[in-house]
Image (tube, coloured by chain):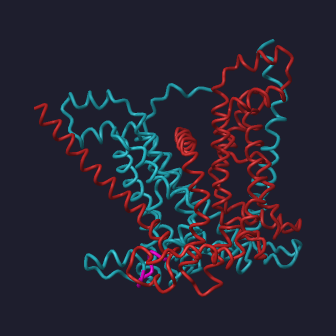
Chain colours: A cyan, B red
Amino acid sequence: MKRKSHSEKAGYLFILPWFLGLLLFTIGPMIFSLILSFSKWDIITGIGSIEFVGLDNFVNIFHDELFYTSLKVTFIFALVSVPLYQIISLLVAMMLNMRTKGMNFFRLIFFMPSVIPAVAVSMMWIMILNPEYGILNKALSLVGIEGPAWLQDPKYALSALIVMGIWGIGNTIIIYLSGLQGVPEELYEAAQLDGAGIVRRFFSVTIPMISPTIFFNLIMGIIGGFQYFTQAFVMTNGGPLNSTLFYNLFLYNKAFKTYEMGYASALSWILFAIILIFTLIVIRTSSAWVYYNGDDDKD
Amino acid sequence: MNIQTSFRKNFAKLIALLILIGGSLIVLVPLLWTVSTSLKTPGEVFGDNFFPEVWKWSNYNDAVNAIPFFTFLKNTLIVLVPVLIGTVFSSALCAYGFARFKFKGKRWLFLVLLATMMLPGQVTMIPMFIMFKEVGWVDTFWPLIIPSFFGGGAFNIFLIRQFMRGIPRDLDEAAFMDGANRWQIFSKIMLPLSKPPLVAVGIFTFMGVWNDFQGPLIYLNSTEKYTLALGLSMFKGLYNIEWNMLMAATILIMLPVLIVFFVAQKYFIEGISISSAMKG
């Protein structure tokens, strides 16, 4: 009797909004997008004029120089920024994990930039990175370095965006901090009694114990890196000389500037495949390096 | 030996504190410089002084008048309020369904829910745009509002569902025995008890809407319909850049999120901690 009260059909009613949303805004569009990716269509003429072209879009994409440029920009960004941000975040989080007065103040400060709208951050940094009166080059000149023209120089524009990103890694720091707070103090004490130094303790206690957090941050970092858009759109719009033409920006241009909807849809599936491959690599290798305390995982 | 280790410990702590202070400066100096630039005269912007000679508060007034700031604010709120209601309410509804009911295919549907979190928005972006264009909703606020009423996002459902599973079943079962129906249990018992994740979802939604750029960029064409984030980027392109005013506008769009952040920091950090406890 008691059990039966929970096995009603009413459950379907409660999840109905999500299920309708799934059909309308996820599965439906996915099917449509798949069809589009094998079609040619400029959206200006009606839906009736969608023309099936088989693999043409994909063939064209693999002959498109800009596709490779955007791929290169995005891969460089992801390969540099993901590990860089993770390492810095983890180090800062470890310092923020100390038990000292005033630590809450530092935590707030470091987390703050990650809530600021990306557009506002971009505006700030356009000014900061300005070669003549920007504060970064002024600071560099104090130590005798002549800063480059950052966003106007194809050699430095991508690096400028990577450097800027460090300013906003508070999100990742907080997640590492919460992971670190879950590590039992006894483990460190036991390791210390066994004569483990600070480096040894870091690699044999901290890293394994927070490996689920590293795993989570790594996946989020990869997904975020491949979808980078707003800052590039606002600050450089892909330039100079396509040095910051991120994949997502390239895709946006194809869809909403030149209205090549089929081509752009094909691009979006390639992006999906790339993210999926990287995520799967992380997940597959995770069994070798992620340790779960796992006794609370029951359904 | 004890003295030696304690010395070494304190020394390490000191170094760490110094690094933290340095890091805080790296975070704060750009912000302070933005504030100070927003208070300078145009001539001073190009000078070497960090702080303005005279604090020109009228820059804020000028910035607000140079762009239709209050129209953009109104537009942002027109999107924000319904999205907030839609997201919190519909994600709570679905979370309750997943937390408390047994029905055929539930495990499978829940897996689908989790899987949708992995799907990059770019895949559905183009077809959704076409759909909304076909029903004549491009350049209206509907495409930004309506989807929030359909489940409020997989991540939010997941967050609330995890919390609801922790509420003792005896509570709602007793109410059920007393003749309360499902809807009453949801609205009178589960909703009030789930305040922490609901508040967290509310705050994240506020941030999401306030910070959203690509959504309004795709769907809104006419300037008088722009939201703040979109309007600010337009400000940069339209005028010969007056940096002091641009920075004043930048500060104005940051301020509400910073206020919410400082008031609600506890929920933020809890919300983020819960999300990272999710297992892959």
Q: Which residues are magenta?
A: A127-133
Q: Is residue B56 left or right of residue B83?
A: left
Observer able to see residue A110: yes
Please state the total of marks drawn on the protein image.
0
When asked about the image quadrant of residue A61, the answer is: bottom right
Residue A27 visible, this angle = no
Residue B138 lies in quadrant: bottom right
Is residue A132 shown in magenta?
Answer: yes
> What residue is drawn where x is 42% and y is 47%?
A105
Q: Is residue A268 left or right of residue B2?
A: right
Spot occupied by residue A183 in the image (x, y as percentages of width and height) = 39, 33
Answer whether residue B26 is magenta in the image. Answer: no
Residue B10 appears left or right of A207:
left
Eyeballing the image, is B245 above or below A107?
A: below
- At x 54%, y 78%, the residue is B244
The residue under the point 74% across, 32% down is: B191
- Residue B57, position in %: x, y? 56, 73
| Residue B11 in the figure: left or right of residue B146 | left
Give the position of the N terminus of chain A as an image quadrant: top right
Foreground residue among A177 and A103: A103
Instruction: Give the image quarter of residue A14.
Output: top right
Q: Nearer the viewer, residue A41 or A106?
A: A106
Query: Would you place residue A55 above or below residue A151 in this image?
Result: above
Q: Please, what is the dominant secondary structure of the magenta stretch?
A: loop
Name the residue at the left extreme. Answer: B1
Q: Position of residue A164 (x, y in %)?
A: 45, 67
Tell me the quarter of the image containing the C terminus of chain A: top right
View extreme (top): residue: A1
Counting from the top left corner in percent of width and height, residue B82 is at 79, 52
The vertical placement of A205 against A229, above or below, is above
